[in-house]
């Protein structure tokens, strides 16, 4: 008499902690073995992708933000998750029945794993997916659309500084007549910037995107878009190197201790100044101060976890502001961040 099959185990906290321990130790073989075991026991691939791999990646991000993990450890763990995801995707799913979709991260967006997870969820739902990967230049994306003629394009953007490039990509996709669904935190809370960028739809998760694409869409008509960007945005982009160099010079002149910075500290400070300019430019481009104030609030938390006092960020904001006194939108945005 055949023994009844064991019920598929739920993806509970014990399993996620076990998987986190494996990726934390860069145990690729163990992670692949675990997802294979879950698949063999009947756990749907969608649940492995979303509730195990996806949930663990969010936890890894939190550990980095809390200064419990280094960037190197985060990258190593993500590489293991990519291999585990590939193992899940290796199981046959049958022929595509829904249509063809192109999926890509916008130019400059290097967080490719969330998009890759969406690609696998779409394949499981019957789509033929052309996954183009991270940081796809707009001209190459459009060439691919002309060559393949997909039914839809899905674009991922997790960082708001990439919104100008996302806007350019969406505009170009619309010109080819292919509807666009956008996803990722870069499009703002509730995807509030997605429509402004010209996307036909936005999804807050892979599962939401799959459900949205399974319906008749796009439901809203394509309309003319407001013009984004202005001379302040153009100045910020073109003057980025000078703004950072001047800020660093004034920092060293005003704070003698800065003379003693190591090469690594100097490089980190330059990078921080660059983030300030980039997020400011994105806020000016979209016309939303919240893009910048959200960035400064998040940065304050990250710096605090690393023992850096908030005054360090305010000093950086002031050094950039002092160079932009002739640009009212930039000054107002910086002032809004400094009073938080």
Image: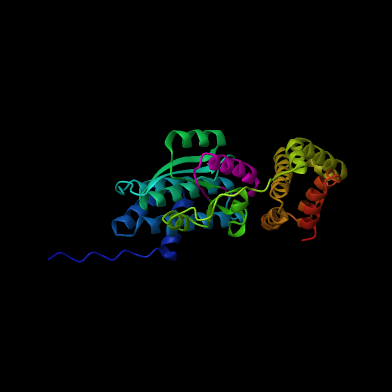
Occupied quadrant, residue 38: bottom left
Magenta segment boundaries in residue numbering? 157-181
Quarter of the picture containing the N terminus is bottom left
Occupied quadrant, residue 336: bottom right
Quarter of the picture containing the C terminus is bottom right
43 or 137, which lies in front? 137
Q: Residue at x 71, y 50 (%)?
A: 283
Residue 190 position within the rendered picture, expressed as x and y whole percent measured from the top left: 59, 60
296 or 172, which lies in front? 172
Task: Answer above or below: position of 235 versus 91.
Answer: above
* Side of 15 where 223 appears, left or right: right
Is 2 a magenta residue? no
* Side of 21 where 286 appears, left or right: right
Q: Residue at x 69, y 47 (%)?
A: 282
Q: Is residue 105 visible?
A: yes
Residue 227 position within the rendered picture, expressed as x and y whole percent measured from the top left: 68, 45
Q: Is residue 67 visible?
A: no
């Amino acid at each position: 008499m055949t023994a009844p099959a064991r019920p598929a185990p739920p993806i509970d906290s014990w399993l996620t902690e076990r998987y986190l321990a494996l990726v934390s130790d860069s145990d690729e073989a163990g992670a692949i073995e675990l997802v294979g075991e879950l698949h063999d026991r009947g756990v749907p691939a969608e649940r492995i992708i979303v509730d195990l791999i996806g949930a663990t990646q969010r936890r890894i991000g939190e550990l980095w933000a809390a200064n419990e993990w280094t960037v190197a450890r985060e990258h190593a763990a993500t590489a293991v998750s990519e291999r585990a995801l590939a193992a899940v995707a290796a199981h046959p799913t049958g022929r595509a029945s829904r249509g063809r979709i192109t999926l890509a991260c916008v130019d400059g967006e290097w967080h490719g794993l969330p998009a890759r997870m969406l690609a696998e969820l779409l394949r499981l739902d019957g789509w033929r997916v052309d996954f183009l990967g991270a940081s796809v230049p707009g001209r190459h994306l459009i060439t691919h659309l002309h060559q393949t003629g997909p039914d839809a394009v899905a674009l991922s953007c997790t960082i708001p500084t990439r919104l100008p490039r996302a806007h350019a990509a969406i505009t170009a996709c619309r010109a080819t007549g292919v509807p666009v669904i956008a996803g990722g935190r870069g499009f703002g809370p509730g995807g509030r910037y997605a429509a402004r960028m010209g996307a036909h739809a936005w999804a807050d998760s892979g599962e939401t995107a799959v459900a949205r694409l399974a319906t008749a869409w796009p439901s809203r008509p394509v309309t003319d878009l407001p013009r984004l960007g202005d001379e302040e945005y153009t100045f910020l982009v073109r003057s980025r190197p000078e703004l950072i160099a001047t800020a660093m010079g004034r920092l060293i002149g005003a704070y003698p201790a800065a003379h003693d910075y190591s090469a690594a500290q100097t490089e980190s400070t330059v990078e921080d100044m660059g983030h300030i300019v980039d997020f400011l430019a994105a806020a000016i481009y979209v016309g939303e101060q919240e893009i910048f104030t959200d960035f400064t609030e998040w940065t304050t938390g990250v710096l605090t976890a690393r023992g850096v006092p908030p005054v360090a960020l305010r000093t950086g904001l002031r050094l950039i502001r002092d160079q932009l006194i002739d640009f009212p939108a930039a000054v107002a945005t910086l002032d809004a961040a400094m009073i938080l």
